[in-house]
Image (spheres, coloured by chain):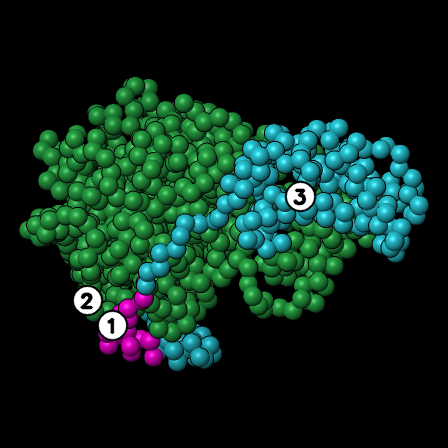
Chain colours: A cyan, B green
Amino acid sequence: MEAVNIQFAPATGTEEEWNEAYARLADYFRSYRLHNRIRRTQLILETLRRAADAHAKDPKRTPTAHAIEQAKRMLHEWLGAIYSDLNLTDSQIEASGRLGFHLCDGPDRWPHFFLDRANLPPDMTEAMRSAVRTSGPRLQISKMTPRDIDLGRITAVAEDTFDTLGRNPLARYALLMVFVGGVLGYFFWLLR
Amino acid sequence: MSDGKATALLQATQGMPPRRYSRARRATFFSFVGLGTILGTWLLCVYLGANGLRWSEIALLAVFVPLYYQLNNGFWTALVGVWLMNRPKYDPLELWRTLSADDYKAPLRANTAIIMPIYNEDVTRVFEGLRSIYLSLQETGQLEHFDFFILSDSDDTNKWIEEEVGWLELCRQLKAFGKIFYRKRRKPINRKSGNVSDFCRRWGKRYRYTVVLDADSLMSGALIDAMVRIMEKNPGIGILQTFPKQIGSETLLGRVMQFAQALYGPAFMAGLDYWQSGEANYWGHNAIIRTAPFIENCALPALPGKEPFGGHILSHDFVEAALMRKAGYAVRLLRTPHGSYEEGPPTLVDMLKRDRRWCQGNMQHFWLLFAKGWHPMSRLNFFHGILSYASSVLWFIFLVLVTFLAALPGTHATEQVVLAEELLLGLTATLIFLPKIVILLDEMFTGRLFQPLKLRLLTFLSCMGDTLVFTLMAPVLMVFHARFVIYTILGKGVSWVAQRRKLDGSIDWWQAFVTYGPITLLGLIWSAVAYFVSLNFLLWISPILISFLLAIPIGILVSGRRSGVRFGLFLTPEEIEKPPVLLQLEENLNEIKDRLQLQPELEHNYGLVQVILDPYVNGLHVSLLRRRRTIHVSRDYLRELAERLIRKGPQSLAPRELKSMIHDTDTVTDLHYRLWSAAEHDLAPFWSMAIKQYNLASSNPFAHLLAQRAPRT
């Protein structure tokens, strides 16, 4: 990446809009845990410069949207160069690539080479490629089929009864009331 | 038996207790239980039947018999346990004796999976627990023979993302990629048993043994290693269940239960092992399973009819044990003084919620009581499970009948009737209190739990305290359990909810009032009735009525943090000298407690915030999602949801809508860029705040959930 020109004078958009885009980009790159502030500032300015060009061509979208769009492109280009021969789809490259950078401690070990497609240290490339992981071991499928349990005749009768009662909640509660009423009636008779 | 073991046929039943032992033990044990029950029933018959038996008295006898059987069963289990713990001769069936000193040094030849099925659990506790087990196993030098699986059924989006983040961070810290695996099911079919079956179908063939853990389980590496060795030496064992001791309690209820389990548990376990022999029960966790026969024989069919009695089997563990035994493998209880731990519910309300589920699960086993092919002991295990809840209904009916009988005009009491009454009262008090006294004396003389005299004396005082607490709680629990049984019979099912394992706030007084208020009212009415019956009867039934009347303060008191720890009460050996595996866990959990907290709204939705804002977490989630060729919902629908999420915040979406977005790889990737690209005025205040605060939360997106300190050495 060439030395960053700190002159930034976008042809389109208001100062307020570009300030918002700057703040958003700053937060965005911080979310990559790039603790190196100089590198972060370089990236922000480089991205804003690209966003300014894009905004000039399409001023309907906000500078913030253009800035994040450019950051996304830069990421795609960078990861594409690292994972070019791994036969992955774009979204797989993006998801696994971001994860790979984290898993190999990229933000701490190679902050200066983040999104720098022109300079890819071989150890970083290798570390990122080997860090792409899967979530489980190779499947080894077994059959686990439930066998019917012969529940016997008593259960069959009980099942029919419960089934009948289950279909008719009124009957269920009536049965309970008859039982409770019968017991209470019996006690009343005893106590009379 | 076809479990792939490399053992000679001669040894294939090793671990299955010889029939002569089992029969002799059961004959002895159940003779005592039967005699005790018959004696009690006979005394009651004499007491009631001086002038012939009325129908109400026959009904009283009918409910008395199972209650007295249960009381006798507990009594003799404890006494046999104390006898076993003190007899100089070794128990010939003791499994620990099957291992020689050389066996411990021999290399392991079996692969074992350690699985932890989880459902919306506290993610930090799950992964820190797993880390402690992992490190403990590492210390044994046998880690290479074990793989870990976190099997998630979580349907809470935040929990799901947090689990993924926790898994990755744990693997990164322990360098355990390829050792610890995370699997999330899209549809949690058949709940926990379905989760375990799914594991068995996918990966079961790779492992000779499977150690099943609960989300709150903790096991030492040494014990897991020994369990595998015992299984290797005893190919006749299908399931080996340990005795998980309760740990980590902070409330009075939790600490009393923890203490009671530590003091009385070993005797009861020894007694259970004595008469259950090769037909013990499986409790669903802290156990090791022989995987091949489990896959072959223990898949659970649905029960006939609908829930709550029919449908999916809730308490699957008892049924799996019965199926394993039916297939010819022993199910054994391993007496484990330490190394196997779990956490208990913190409050009485949490305990009741758990009991509600267990009640329904056990009542479902009614169907299985009469099924064909079970070993008689498996049938008895089902019966005991049902009785453990049905006995509350019986006890309640017993008390109602006793009240009505007391209200009847009295007859002249003969000497024989008075003697029978006094003997029955004495016998019942003996059955209730003697096991506690004997176990306490055993501790006083042997110092099994504590050697220092001061601690033994504190144990004595704690025993008095726990007797008081349980005496006050038992009638309250009886009413609730009776209600649960009746609800189940009336067809009111129970939903699957995550368990609370720690007291995360202060006590909710309103909840306590609403929950226990009706019991206090019942106590008031019953007291009035008893007063009108007679003063003597009021005195006789007063222990029950006092418990009813004090239900609200009891509920609040036992759920509070004043647990007597200041006075050295209810101490357990694990509190005095923490085992390394527990110490590691507690130190890590304490570190996490001190982490920077975000705004409550962000903290509550932290998983969602991370998966959308954080490029690494977003990448992780997309990487773990299975890419589908077709999706069940339209792209327009997902776009509309995404738009709403960004403009109105997460509270504008139903959990189901959130899940459908987070399940789709393209939507998740798109959301990440759409949110960062959105102009400030298009963002919901929630997201504006999230963007500003997210980077401040921690220097590492994965450090929010897990401790960062180096492991203990």
Look at label 2 and name its amino acid.
Gly
Residue drawn at (66%, 31%) of the image: A111
> Which label number is shown at residue A78?
3
Task: Find disc 1 in the rendering and name its residue.
Answer: A150
Q: Taking B511 as reference, is B78 above or below it?
A: above
Secondary structure category for the residue under label 2: loop
Q: Position of residue B398 (x, y in %)?
A: 32, 59
Look at the image and say whether residue B377 sits in the magenta stretch: no
Give the Cα separation between the discs numbered 2 and 3.
65 Å
Q: Relative to A8, is A109 on the left or the right?
A: left
Task: For the residues labelled 2 and 3, say whether their Cβ atoms are less than 8 Å apart.
Answer: no
Residue drawn at (76%, 47%) of the image: A70
Single out the mark in the foreground, 2 or 3: 3
Residue drawn at (72%, 48%) of the image: A73
Mark 2 belongs to which subunit? B
Which span of residues is magenta-colored? A144-160
Quadrant of the snapshot with the C terminus of chain A: bottom left
Give the Cα separation between the discs numbered 2 and 1.
8 Å
Residue B388 visible somewhere in the drawing: no
Quadrant of the snapshot with the N terminus of chain A: top right
> Which label number is shown at residue B373?
2
Secondary structure category for the residue under label 3: helix
Q: Position of residue B325 (x, y in %)?
A: 20, 57
Mark 2 Cα-neighbour bin, 10 Å: few <14, some 14–19, many ≥20: some
Mark 1 belongs to which subunit? A
Mark 1 Cα-neighbour bin, 10 Å: few <14, some 14–19, many ≥20: few
Look at label 1 and name its amino acid.
Asp
> Foreground: B379 or A32?
A32
Task: For the residues labelled 2 and 1, say whether their Cβ atoms are less than 8 Å apart.
Answer: yes
Q: Taking A182 as reference, is B431 above or below it?
A: above
> Foreground: B700 or B605?
B700
